[in-house]
Amino acid sequence: MLTPVARMNKPKLPSSRFVFAIFALVAATIAAPPAAAPAAAQDPRARQPSTVKQVASDLYFFYDYDGSNSVFLVTDAGVLVIDTREHPRAGQDLLDRVRKVTDKPIKWVINSHFHGDHTFGNAAFQAAGATFVAQQETARIMALVQPKEMARRQDYFKANRYDPSEVKLILPDVTFDMDLTLHLGGREIRLMYFGPGQQPGDTFVLFPQERALFTPGAFARHSMPNMAFTPSVDNWIKLLNEVASRNDYDYILPAHGDVAHRDDVKELAAMLADEYATVKGAVAKGVPLQQAQETLTFPQYKDWRNYERLKNEIKSLYELIQTGRRSYFE
């Protein structure tokens, strides 16, 4: 039985893509891998083989160090997946891994946010008969920025010899506002939206019986996040602190990086507060962007993953602080 905790909305998008259906027993959780960054080739830990970790009797974590992750829940009534990787072929690889565990039907796919490395594998799961669900902002932005997402994934496609023309925009069949609860094979899956984090639409997924929490792009352990999409760093920090204070999970399955815990969430919230306050201070003093990029080095985070993209993050924060705009959505 599908039990909505808050309003469910049919996306205002092409009707051929949206059949608002309620299924009796369904649930799916996926975490998808992102495009390979140039810096990854310089990292001695890079190009690690992806793997599937069984984290509970019925819950599996697809971990891709060089990309993004997925989660899938296996029940007698079917499978729930979160995020579908960065290309239909990568999505098919994920589906093949699921099939090594179970032959149960794929009932639900959750897209945790709009990034192509979490949605471009949707076609493989659509062919498998899945129903797609996402927060309503995720659905809106997926349609809005598809050309830009395709453009910034070209290096990944070339590196993996994937044909970009195989990528199709597969929009959600069901959207929700703040909360949605799915029931599948005796398992409860809670989708939660706390407002924009790394971007609007960031969806957290709680597995109460397994005491596990899936986190979207708003969190990654010991990793400097991409700042180009958030409309509110303050809300991002607030929601991270709220997530860290919850007592209904024991471990975190993030969209990027390995299994984490609540102290890691607190650490990221503190890092964001530090970075944001420092950059705001530079803007208030009239420090030019280029000078800020050269002088604000944040050496305390030099061992964090993605530290090498710090200059771009400072540029993104300057745009937000000075203009209130997020040009990626324009």
Image (tube, rainbow, N blue to C red):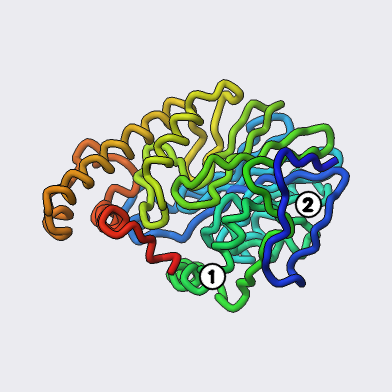
In the image, farthest residue toward the bottom: 165
Q: Residue at x 49, y 24 (%)?
A: 245
Image height of 13 relative to 304, above or below: below
x, y percentage for residue 5? 72, 38
Distance from label 2 to label 1 (Cα)?
25 Å
Task: Name the side, left or right, on which 228 lies relative to 64.
Answer: left
Measuring from the top left, give residue 324's x and y in whole percent: 34, 57
Q: Residue, x 44% and y 41% (percent of image)?
A: 220
What x and y, as percent, mark residue 185? Answer: 84, 37
- Image quadrant containing the C terminus: bottom left
Q: Residue 1's image quarter? A: top right
Numbered circle sitting on residue 4: none
Residue 183 or residue 157, whichever sits in front: 183
Q: Earlier in the sequence, mark 2 or mark 1?
A: 2
Q: Is 163 on the left-hand or right-hand side of 104?
A: left
Q: Nearer the viewer, residue 61 or 239?
A: 239
Q: Position of residue 329 (x, y in %)?
A: 45, 65
**10 Å neighbourhood of mark 1: few (<14), some, or many (≥20)?**
some
- Is residue 6 visible in the rendered image? The answer is yes
Q: Nearer the viewer, mark 2 or mark 1?
A: 1
Quadrant position of residue 183 = top right
Q: Secondary structure at mark 2?
A: strand
Disc 2 marks a residue whose amino acid type is: Ile
Residue ID at (79%, 50%): 107
Total numbered labels: 2
Residue found 28% across the figure and 47% down from its top: 307
Q: Which residue is mark 1?
A: 146
The amino acid pointed to by label 1 is Gln
Residue highlighted by disc 2: 106
How would you rate the neighbour count of disc 2 (Cα within 10 Å): few for under 14, some for 14-19, many for 20 or more? many
Is residue 96 among the parts visible in the rendering? no
